[in-house]
Image (tube, grey):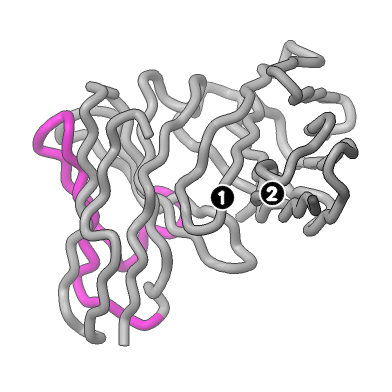
Amino acid sequence: DAGITQSPRHKVTETGTPVTLRCHQTENHRYMYWYRQDPGHGLRLIHYSYGVKDTDKGEVSDGYSVSRSKTEDFLLTLESATSSQTSVYFCATTREGMNTEAFFGQGTRLTVV
Amino acid sequence: SQQGEEDPQALSIQEGENATMNCSYKTSINNLQWYRQNSGRGLVHLILIRSNEREKHSGRLRVTLDTSKKSSSLLITASRAADTASYFCATVPGGGSNYKLTFGKGTLLTVNP
């Protein structure tokens, strides 16, 4: 797992509440990514980071924000959770963008009720 | 939107048989990657093949890439029950935007003992 830890692993939250998911890596990789995985959709990129304080949007970024204040931590925040954000969230890292292999965390299963 | 599309969606074979999965994509790529996901786990990188390569091997895995047809195949030889998993192809676009790894919806491989 290349030293990638996601927390929490499971969370149930109510609609309208803020939620923060954490990804922590020990590999000193420059790039970090947040994906969501839903049945029938594969994995879709939410946000990514190419360095400390450097982030950009992916294809499904609406309703999500991210922050990266340290190389090792990448936070994903759902400002006001909705049922459509019920999903499994994966963090990934790479040394040099996506021209090298990506290492994935074990995932966070989020349920919004 | 999905760049890679795997075919078939599901494949069931007997232990010892070979398994072939195909991936088609729509636009030019920098590289194409294959990942495996065991149920409830994160994704694990298998092989990366660059756009100027035609074939790569890794143990019992063989990946081919045909850029003229915008397609790739993953061959697993002498399959084992432990190969049971979902397999995803993912593409990195050409043209310098090397941060986006776009996944297909995956092929579910079941290897029966």
Q: Amino acid at mark 2?
A: Thr
What is the distance, in whole Å, between disc 1 and disc 2 at their CAs?
Answer: 7 Å
Note whether residue A67 is visible. yes
Return the x and y of residue A65 as percentages of the image width and height.
23, 57
Eyeballing the image, is A10 above or below A58?
A: below
Return the x and y of residue B108 as percentages of the image width and height.
72, 55
Mark 1–mark 2 CB contact (< 8 Å) = yes
To the question of a shared chain for discs 1 and 2, the answer is yes
For marks 1 and 2 on the same chain, the one whose residue lies earlier in the sequence: 1
Give the crowd class for mark 1: few <14, some 14-19, many >=20 residues within 10 Å: some
Question: Which residue was labeled with disc 1?
Answer: B38
Determine the chain carrying the residue at label 1.
Answer: B
Write down the quadrant of residue A32 in the picture: top left
Q: Amino acid at mark 1?
A: Asn
| SS type, badge 1 | loop
Write down the quadrant of residue A78 in the picture: bottom left
Question: Which quarter of the image is occupied by the N terminus of chain B?
Answer: bottom right
Q: Which mark is residue B85?
A: none
Which residue occupies the extreme front position in the image?
B113
In this orientation, which residue lies closer to the viewer: B110 or A33?
A: B110
Q: Which mark is residue B84?
A: 2
Report the residue at 49% width, 25% height from top: A101
| SS type, badge 2 | loop
Report the residue at 38% width, 49% height from top: A106
In this orientation, which residue lies closer to the viewer: A4 or A101?
A: A4
Q: Which residues are magenta?
A: A58-83
State the count of labels: 2
In this orientation, which residue lies closer to the viewer: A70 or A90?
A: A90
